[in-house]
Image (cartoon, coloured by chain):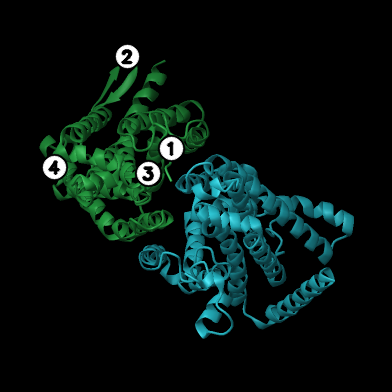
Amino acid sequence: MQLVRRIGVALLIGGALYGLQLVLEDGLIEYVQRIVLLAGINVILAVGLNLINGTTGQFSIGHAGFMAVGAYGSAYLGVQLAPVVQSLLGAGAVADAVTFNVALLLGALLAAIAGLLVGAPSLRLRGDYLAVVTLGFGEIIRISFNNAKFLGSATGYFGDTPAGLPAYTNFFWVYAWAIAIVIAVRNLTFSQTGRSLAAIREDEIAAEAMATPTTRLKVLAFSFSAATAGIAGGLFAFMQSGIRPEDFRFDKSIDMIVMIILGGLGSISGAVVGGVFVAVTLELMRDLQQYRLVLYALLLIVIMLVRPKGLFGTRELPELIRARFGRGKTVVGAAK
Amino acid sequence: VSTFFQQILNGLSLGSIYALIALGYTMVYGILKLINFAHGEVFMIGAYAGYFAALGLGVESYGAAGFPLYLALVVLVAAMAAAALLGVTIELLAYRPVRSAPRLTPLITAIGVSLFLQNAAMLAFTPNPRPYPAILSEVRFELGGVIVTNVKITIFAVAIGLMVGLHWFVQRTWTGKAMRAVSTNIDAARLMGIDTDRIIRATFAVGSALAAAGGILFGLDQIVIHPLMGMLTGLKAFVAAVLGGIGNIRGAVLGGLLIGLAEQLTAGYLSPDYRDAITFVILIVILIARPEGLLGVVRPEKV
């Protein structure tokens, strides 16, 4: 019965997204469309990064590297896959959708493997080592793509045709993935595993004393987080005609950190709000590029000094609304 | 064989610069258990301070004849003083308020400070690389097929001199003794009447001054400086500190020299493309094989 209901809800959401997609395609100018798509991608990035930086209390500052792995992986594999899928299903919307989603999943898989390689050695130790290792990893990945000839080196990867990468990414798919990932992260966070992750954040030694397999869970959360960054990278790649190593500089990792710190470390709805906020402000501050990172840096410092848990803290939006307007019973999670 | 010795020489001079920077990371980590991400930027600003000090003293008018030695020393001391001031200010404004917060908070603050200094420097100094003034006019001579320059020798000599000075400071002075006490147990040190705030301030001042010296030597060695140079160099110096055993002063020197050698040998024998990657490989290997570092000791974490 529950399964039927879930399928029903999924169909309803899918239908609503498809309807919105049709409206948006004619209704909005391209500039606004781009912001809407980027906001969705940011939501995926923020919610995924929040799992490791917020919920588990480790700190990755190189997530742009995983995004790059996913972007290059799914772009390259998608281009290779397209003819195969078309020969099986015939050219058309169905073949495109299959190619796109398989490419995204493969990109996510590659990003997860990269996450495993980076996380397994560094997560055995105190969290601050992860910060340094991920910082180094982000740079190394970018340098590697800069030197990878078959991926277009520094000019970037634009597929095999002069037309560039196919424009698979649209409103429907971005938000379908965003909703799926938000639900997946939510379920993970409120599961037993999620509670263990929060225990690691609060006190790693105590968690270990309670027989929590801390290293294994940290690596699991980190790889999952890398995979979501990979999905976001794939969506980002097929949004434009090509991707360049420059798209995944250190700034990108900082953008992600600003998203989750604004929203609150450990709050999923906070990450959603932070992701949208950064997408919009980035566009609005386009002319002030050179001041942007100075402002972000100051914002980070000031939030840490004044409200170190971020604007939402670990609380979720519904709790905050209830707490604010006093309806319903006291929420357990909201108690300080 | 002569190329090999050439690489060794270059590696040692680069490594001694890393060692100078690594000392700052290791000293701060030893006391506060904080990775001072902004340290790479202090190094960068130290290099710029030296740049402006040299220009201010009219280095250009000396041309090829070279800058008098006493003025070169003035440049060094001025840059070290400026960086010390910067380090103490960062500690006061950004780190002290979050010192007792959960450890993620100071880490994010440090990243924020690093990012702020990087981008403020890009606004203030423009992102373009600048040629470093010829504080020393280069003299080349050959020694058994190896090209030695007075710049490389100076780098090595200044670095070693500063490290010996630091060793004396930490081992023989009252403040140095207090630093070691605070690093062993900050609470016990406070109970013994040590003004821990003052000692932490002194640690930041000394570490930052050494980084500024590293910045000037780096400028001499690499000829150009730019606002983002602190990021990768800082990362390498941090790896050097971890390699030697973080919190251990002799370890930082050893780690710095080893990283410099590894980088030069990789660039010389494998490919210059991998020179930045090798540091990262070393970091991963050390974290797997011996996370306490070469000279570090395992201290069990107490609950």
- Residue at image mark 2: B144
| Chain identifier of the residue bearing label 4 in the image | B
| Residue B74, numbered circle | 4
Q: Amino acid at mark 2?
A: Gly
Q: Residues within 10 Å of mark 4 (few under 14, many from 20)?
A: some
Q: In which image quadrant can residue B23 be found?
A: top left
1 vs 4, front mark: 1
Q: Amino acid at mark 4?
A: Val
3 vs 2, front mark: 3
1 vs 2, front mark: 1
Give the drawing colour for chain A: cyan
Q: Find the distance from the CA under tag 3 to the CA under tag 2.
A: 34 Å
Q: Is residue B30 left or right of residue A50?
A: left
- The chain letter of the green chain reads B
* SS of the residue under disc 1: loop
**B148 and B211: which one is in front?**
B211
Q: Find the distance from the CA under tag 2 to the CA under tag 4.
A: 35 Å
Q: Is residue B23 left or right of residue A316?
A: left
**B149 and A232: which one is in front?**
A232
User: Where in the figure is residue A280, as x and y percent of width and height?
Assistant: 52, 73
Q: Find the distance from the CA under tag 1 to the CA under tag 2.
A: 50 Å
Q: Find the distance from the CA under tag 4 to the CA under tag 3.
A: 25 Å
